[in-house]
Amino acid sequence: MRVADSMKKLPLLQSADLRGKVVLVRVDHNVVKQGIIQDPYRIDRTIGTIYNIVERGGRFILMTHVGRPRDKKTGAISCDASTSVRPIAEYLERKLHTKFHIPEIPRTGNKGIPGIDTSINLAIKDLKERKIGGIYLPNTRWFQGEEAGGSERDCFALQLAGLADVYVNDAFGSWQPHTSTYDITKHLPSYAGFLMQEEITNLSKVLEPERPFVAVVAGAKYDTKIGPLNEIYNKVDQLILGGVLYNAYLCAKYNVRIAGVSETDVEAAKKLVERDKASKKIFELPFIVEADTLEGKIEGQYRTIKVNALESGKEYGYILDIDARSFEDPEVNKSLSSARTIFVNAVMGFTPHFTEGSEALDRTIDKNRTAIKLYGGGDTLQEFKNLCPGLYLSILDNALYYLFTGGGSVLKAIEKHSPFGIKPVQALIENAERFQK
């Protein structure tokens, strides 16, 4: 089913009755590292939803996850300033010229926050009386019930539902079915926010692309990208690889060893190499940068080598970037300049020292003034902004560009053949069937 047809089943914010209602909004404001906002783009993209709620008579409570405060091995949850939502709330206070309240909820040692207590009721009263502009809950991953199972999870979902009258998911980037993105929909009328709607609509340009369709995909681990990569391969006319994905591919095709590439990744890449013998969709970037160390770009310890000069059976150092000259190659240049749709989920080099490949990629793509260009992923956007700040600012309102707020969600949607295969989106549709008959 086409994305446009499936959209008709999605409950939309503009259909909700918000007057006099408290609205619990799940956003993806996961932009804080070590207590500092890296890029407010994801925050800014949700302001339309926030404004609409207030303009239509609603009052909002925001919640997001920040980082990974939970230790997967021990289950310990670190609730400290490095993963606090405070910088986000302060940014929104400056942006919206209003006051936010962050509830101080007691924690239990290294087990995080056990639940939401009644102390928040006074803040909700102030919110309804417009003494404050909004409430921002602590990092959802600080709560024990966010990623838990069983009764802890059920209890947290009920506590969240008890705060509001309506739930809005505007966090397409948060595709995992956690309590704040999934279970909450069992208890409140639930709707998709404007950013969620826009992300899904623009995904149709990847899932149902204008052709020729070129994708550029990179990643630090091959095995985590196998599913999405296979589906992307099915859809594209041409595919360009970078990072460890490209390194594993080169190892598999040319029978070489590259430092840092696991045998597991090489074995996985062999299937792609075999598949491409017939389809010939992969465009090899001809110049790569080999380095002796991961410690930095040290003079005399890195060099450019040619892919067609790789020798079977030989061991190479770390391949840490794509030489910018690769994008001057006639075949590569022709592929990118003649495309009608370009999808990029890629940082080409080992940051922060090896960045020439990513910059050359972005500038080459921009020379194509007719293609739809879709960028996905926090790291992809951050690198774009760092390396090409002027270009980044110039394309924010360019109709030919779309910058997805969640790269993982885009890849998951591609793997599932549809954004409606993602659990939190499915939950909204199921909610509509329960609450809005």
Image (tube, rainbow, N blue to C red):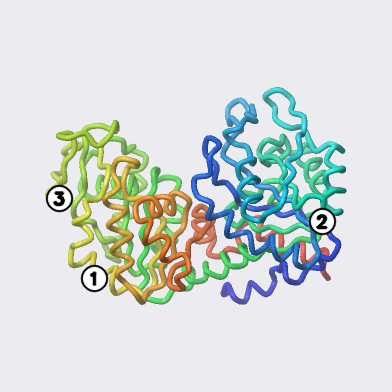
Image point 78% across, 68% down: which residue? Answer: 56
What residue did someone put label 3 on? 306
What residue did someone put label 1 on? 334
Of labels 1 and 2, earlier in sequence is 2
Give amino acid for label 1.
Answer: Lys
Q: Nearer the viewer, mark 2 or mark 3?
A: 2
Task: Please state which of residues 95 and 321 is positioned toward the viewer in this rendering.
Answer: 95
The quadrant of the image that shows the N terminus is: bottom right
Q: Measured along the vertical axis of the image, is residue 196 above or below residue 256? A: below
Q: Regarding mark 1 in the picture, which secondary structure is present there?
A: helix
How crowded is the residue under tag 3: few (<14 C-alpha within 10 Å), some, or many (20+)? some
Q: What residue occupies the far top of the structure in this picture?
A: 109
> CB atoms at circles 2 and 3 under 8 Å apart?
no
What residue did someone put label 2 on? 22
**Is residue 307 left or right of 68 when viewed as pictured?**
left
Q: Regarding mark 3 in the picture, which secondary structure is present there?
A: strand
Give amino acid for label 2.
Answer: Val
- From where the camera sits, is residue 430 visible? no
Whole-angstrom CA distance, mark 1 to mark 2, is 53 Å
Image point 58% across, 60% down: which residue? Answer: 45
How crowded is the residue under tag 1: few (<14 C-alpha within 10 Å), some, or many (20+)? few
Whole-angstrom CA distance, mark 1 to mark 3, is 20 Å
Image point 60% across, 33% down: which residue? Answer: 69
Give amino acid for label 3.
Answer: Lys
